[in-house]
Amino acid sequence: WRLGPCVQRLARAAAEPSMNDLLAAYDDDGDGCVDLSPLPVAPMRHRKVQLLPPAELLKATEPPEQAQAKREEPAVTHKPALAIAHRMWRAATVALWRSDHDDLLGGDAADALTGPGPTEGEMAAWFEDRARYIPLRLALRERKPLRLLEGMVGVAEYTTLVDTPQLASNPARRAQRQLKEVSALLAGLLTALDEQQGFKVVSRKPPNFAPFEQVYANVFEGVRRYKVMNPEKMRVSYGKMLYLLQDSALPDVAEFTECNLIKPLDTVYEHLKRHNGLALLRDELLGAATQCIAPEPGKSRAQLQQDIRTKERAVEMLVRKYASRALPEDAVRLALYSIGDNNAYLHQARDPIDRVIHLLCQHFDPKRAESDELSLAISDGAGGARLSHSHARQHNYVLQSLVLWREIANDMFKLWCLAEADLLDGSSPYELRDTGQGLQRVQPAPRTEKAMKELLHRTQRKLGSWVGSAVIHMGDSNVPNALTFIDKYAAIERILNPLLSVLDAIAAAPRAGSPQLQAYIAMRWQSPLGATKCILADFFRFAFDGSGADNFYDAGSCIDGRLTSAWNWCSQLPQKPFYPLFKMCGFIGFDGEFQA
C-alpha cells in the first residue's frame, strides 16, 4: 500500500482552481481556506493513519527531522466547520435576516450582531442545551411498536367515549369507563406484541399489567418521541394517546393497572451521557456534521453535492474520533442524525418565518407606505379588523409577531418536552368543562407558560419595544392545556409554507410559468412584483388585525390572538380577489394531511 503517491495525488487534486472554488463556498472570508470535504477518509483497518488537511498532505513525506519540528505546532483549526457552527448559533440567537436590515434593530439584537462571535465555551454550552431537548431518532427495533400503537390509537375512540357531557356529570361512571378503555388498549397492545403473554394477561381477572410496565412505557415513549420529531404526523391519534396517558396517571386507574406508562423522553443529551460521550457536543465539527442541506437560490448542483460530501466526511471523522467500547459507532451516528433531524425541522418551520420577515422588510417601508393600495394601515371595523393601526405601527406590530413566532419555532422541541411534562403531571389534575368550544380538559401548564414568558421577554429585548398586549393565554378557555398550545403554534409552518410556495411560483412565472398564468398576472397586476406586493399587503394587514373571535379578549392583540387572526385570514382566502392566482399556482390548502 503506497501511501506517499496517493497523498501527493490528493494534494494536487485539491490544488486545482475548480476545487478551490468549491472549497471557498463555506469560507466566510472567501480566502480559499481549508475545507473538510477533501479530507481523506482512511478505511477501518487503517485507523492509526493520521488524517491531515490538504495543505498539510505533502508535508507528510518530509524528512523525519523536519516532521519532528512540525509536531510542536498547534493543531490546524477547521475554520469552515466553525463557520457553519457559528451560523447555526447566530440563526438561533439573532435572526439571519437582521444583517440586511440593521435600521430595524433594537435592544440586545444590535449588540449581538456587531459584537464578537461566540467563544468555544459558549458554543459548547449552546449545543449541550439544545441536545437536552432533542429527542433521539427511533431505532429500527422501535418502528414496529410505533406502527402498531399508532394504528390502535387511530381506530380507538377513547376521547369520544370518555369525554362526554353525560360522564362529565357522573365522575364514578367516567372512572369506570376510563378503567375499561385503558385496560382494553393495554391488553390488545401486549397481545399484538407477544400473543402468549397477552393471552395470559387477558385470561386473568383482574388482568396483571405490572410485569410489563417497562414494555408499555418504552412503547409509549417511542411514539411520543416520534411525534415530537415529526409534528406533521399523527395529528389525530397523538392527542388521544396523550389523553389516555393522562388518565392512566389518575389514582384510580394507576391503582388498577399497577404500572406507570409514562417515562421521560430519551434525548440526545441523555443518550450520550449514558455512553460517556458528552465530549461529542463540544467538537467543532458538530455543526458541519449536522447541518441541513437544502436547495437555495443561487446554489448550484455542484455546490449541493459538495455540501453533502462535506457533511458525510464530518460524520465519519466524528465517528472515528469518538467511537469506543462505551460509545459504539452506531450510537455516535444516532446522536448526530438526531441533531440533524432537529436542524431539518428548523429549516422547515423556522426558516419560512425568516423569509416572510425578509419580505416584509424588503417590500414595505417601516415609516411610510408606497401607495394607498400598499399601505398596511388598518381601522377597527373595516374589513373585519378589531385593531386600529397606522402603517408604521402595523409594520412594527407584524414584525414583532413574526419574530416571536420565530423564537417559538426555534425552541419548539423544548416547548414540546415541557408541554408533555405539564400534561402528564399527575400532581396537576385537569378539569373537564365546557369552554365554549365543547368539552375541554382545562389544566394549568406552569412549565410551558414560564418558557413562553422567557421567549416573549427575549423577543422584547431584541426589538427594544412592543406594540399591543403581552398576555399569554394558558390553562383557560382560550388555550385549555399545553396540548392545545403546541398544536396551535406547530401549525405556523402550515400557514407560511403554502403562502411562500405561491409567491415563489409567481416570481418564477416569467421563466417557467404557463402563458395563461403570465397573461393573468400582466392583466391584473402588470408584473409578478405587483402581484407579490398585493398579496403580502393583504396578508400583513388582515392576518394581523385582531380578528377571528367574538370578543377582544379571545383575539385582539394578545400573544395567542395574533395567531388566531392569521388562521382567520386563511379561512377567508376564497373571498380574496387574488384567490384564482393561488389556484393557478398550485395552491391546495393550509391544513395538510391529517393521517400522514
Image (cartoon, rainbow, N blue to C red):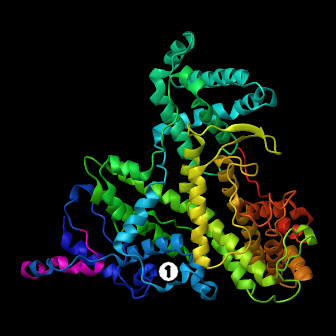
Magenta span contains residue 413: no
Residue 408 screen position, x and y as percent: 61, 62
Residue drawn at x 92%, y 81% is 523
Magenta span contains residue 61: yes
Q: Write down the region rendered in magenta.
A: 51-67
Up-down relation of residue 596 to residue 297 (above or below): above
Up-down relation of residue 481 to residue 260 (above or below): below
Q: Is residue 295 visible?
A: no
Quadrant of the snapshot with the N terminus: bottom left
Residue 202 screen position, x and y as percent: 57, 14
Residue drawn at x 52%, y 25% is 193
Secondary structure at badge 1 equals: helix
Q: Is residue 85 visible?
A: yes
Question: Which image quadrant for residue 76?
Answer: bottom left
Question: Which image quadrant for residue 234?
Answer: top right
Up-down relation of residue 196 to residue 75 (above or below): above
* 192 relative position to 532: left or right: left
* Crowdedness near tag 1: few (<14), some (14–19) or many (≥20) residues, C-alpha within 10 Å: some
Residue drawn at x 46%, y 80% is 25
Examine the residues drawn in magenta and state their main secondary structure: helix
Residue 531 screen position, x and y as percent: 83, 79
Residue at the disc numbered 1: 112
Q: Amino acid at mark 1?
A: Ala
Residue nearest the observer in this picture, 287 or 221: 221
* 89 relative position to 171: left or right: left
Residue drawn at x 55%, y 79% is 109
